[in-house]
Amino acid sequence: MKSTELILLNFEEIRRRSMKLWKGMPEKFFTWQPDQLAMSGIEMVRHVLECEDAYHEIILHKGSQFDYKSPWENEPFINISKEIAFAQPYRERFLETVRSFSEEDMSQIQIVRTELGQVRGLGDFLLRVAYHEATHTGQMLSYLRTLNIPRPNVWD
């Protein structure tokens, strides 16, 4: 497999597992948060989906020196299914962009995030994007454990 194919497989597997988890959270707990500073379950789902779109824009601009306007900015929180549906066109656009990269692009394109003092190769950056979602999947699992809610099997 080529690196682009592996990265896409990783994105798809992480999202498949996230979806199992997100859909396994009972609606009455969507707004639960472990403390005042933490995101609620639905906020965390939106955060993951919105960040993927922001990361996509960072990739398109080869860095974060641009004015990003979130499509979620004025969207009310309704439920997780609506969050997923709203994000779907942005997800497809993101994956199509990743599919367009060549092997050379993975190492030659540099993503410069001056506000963080970061310069990363595209392949490295894409793996970090995937890690972001995977981290929040673990965080959501801990929410469900704290609430003593049965957790979907994401380890299939």
Image: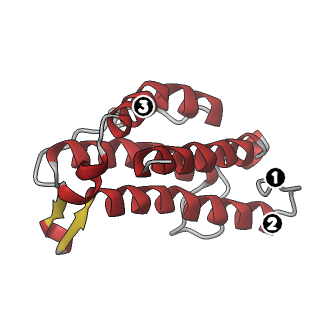
Vertical side of 87 occupied by 145: above or below: below
Q: Position of residue 89 (x, y in %)?
A: 43, 24
Kindly identify the amino acid type of the residue bearing the numbered disc 1: Asp
Mark 3 or mark 1: which comes first in sequence? 3
The answer to whether residue 48 shows anywhere in this view is: no
79 or 106: nearer the viewer: 106
Q: Which residue is mark 1?
A: 156
Mark 1 or mark 2: which comes first in sequence? 2
Q: How is the image coloured?
A: secondary structure
Vertical side of 135 occupied by 99: above or below: above
Q: Which residue is mark 2?
A: 145
CA gap, disc 2 to disc 3?
29 Å
Report the residue at 42% width, 35% height from top: 95
Tell whether 26 sits left or right of 1: right
Kindly identify the amino acid type of the residue bearing the numbered disc 2: Arg
Tell whether 93 sits left or right of 111: right
Question: The residue tagged with tag 3: helix, strand or loop?
Answer: loop
